[in-house]
Image (cartoon, coloured by chain):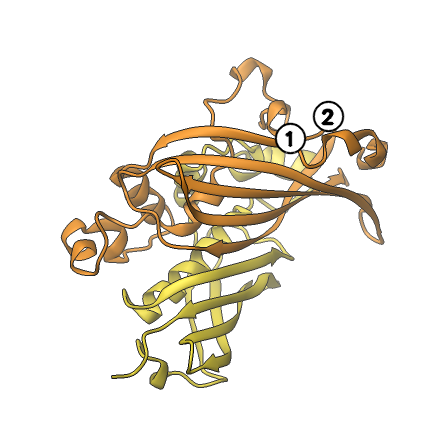
Chain colours: A yellow, B orange
Amino acid sequence: MNSIDDVSVGDTVSREQTPTRAQLFRYSAITWNPHRIHYDTKYASDVEGHPDVLVQAHFHGAVMQGLLMDQFGPEGQLTDLGWQNVGRAIPDEPLTVGAEVTSVNESTGHVKFDVWTESSEGRCAEGTAAVKLPASE
Amino acid sequence: MSSEIDPGDYEDRLETTERWEYGVLTRRDARRYARSVEDENPLFHDVEYAREHGYDDVVVPPNFLSAIIDPTEGCPASELREDGLDPNQFPIDMPSEVILMGGGQDLTIDRYATAGSSLTIEETFVNIYQRESSSMGVLTFLEQESEYIVDGDERVLRCEATMIVGDRQ
């Protein structure tokens, strides 16, 4: 799916991954994020009332980005990505990331999407994105 | 508590911009960020592959730039808040016993930054307001707009971000 001709409104892509505690540690490290809710289970639960340590808010954007950039290959350009964090995700639980095509502009090559992440508890993040694809040859 | 925050106290801070020189984005930055989310896109990892597709070096995952929580070295550990965060990273005087949540981001990606670029971040505090939540009481919303500029003059990314301040439950 790397040309505008290959894309139609309603097309949906998704995949599942399970963030691990080691992944969350690495993500906090590379983003210089010392927030204890991402690595201190006792603090996260006893002080802030979360069920466990939490997957970082930006992590959800990263997996949306990864899905779209993988799906459309190096010729596709991610131009917009927006999301709101609407629920919590915890490590060692499956997290599904998905995208659905909502519009295709064949003259500009822009494809717009609804994007989301969800766990067994429901939506964790949701928003919109846009990718610019090359015109068909 | 979030309700202790008076948005009116911060009107004079709105539209103020802070600027940081992050330094050079390295191949290791790009690869480590991608690896942290198990993203094996060769644009992020393989220099030759990136060059074959028109980039001068590996691509830096776009939302890495806006995911950087603190572009500085941060405060000494002894000065971190109980929640682990640096008290200097907020545009307001943050009460101690509150919960801080990332509310989301809107990214406009002008082009992909590549390794070797020198990054400057300009962050502007644009809004503060409060809403009553049925389950969490008064929530305070902080909105910031950031521009990510490479090599001194080219914007590669714009980010509108919301931080939510709530009370411990």
Disc 2 packing (10 Å; few <14; some 14–19; many ≥20)? few
Q: CA distance from mark 1 to mark 2?
A: 7 Å
- B119 to the left or right of A117: left
- B72 to the left or right of B29: right
Is residue B156 visible in this depiction of the protein?
yes
Q: Chain of mark 2?
A: B
Residue at the disc numbered 1: B90
**Identity, as a three-letter code, of the amino acid under mark 2:** Asp
| Residue placed most toward the observer, A78 or A25 | A78
Spot occupied by residue B11 in the image (x, y as percentages of width and height)? 79, 33
Spot occupied by residue A13 in the image (x, y as percentages of width and height)? 42, 75
**Identity, as a three-letter code, of the amino acid under mark 1:** Phe
- B126 to the left or right of A33: right
Q: Secondary structure at mark 2?
A: loop
Is B103 situated above or below A16? above
Residue at the disc numbered 2: B93
Spot occupied by residue A85 in the image (x, y as percentages of width and height)? 61, 55
Dots 1 and 2: beta carbons under 8 Å?
A: yes
| Residue placed most toward the observer, B68 or A96 | B68
**Residue name at image x 31 percent, y 44 percent:** B30
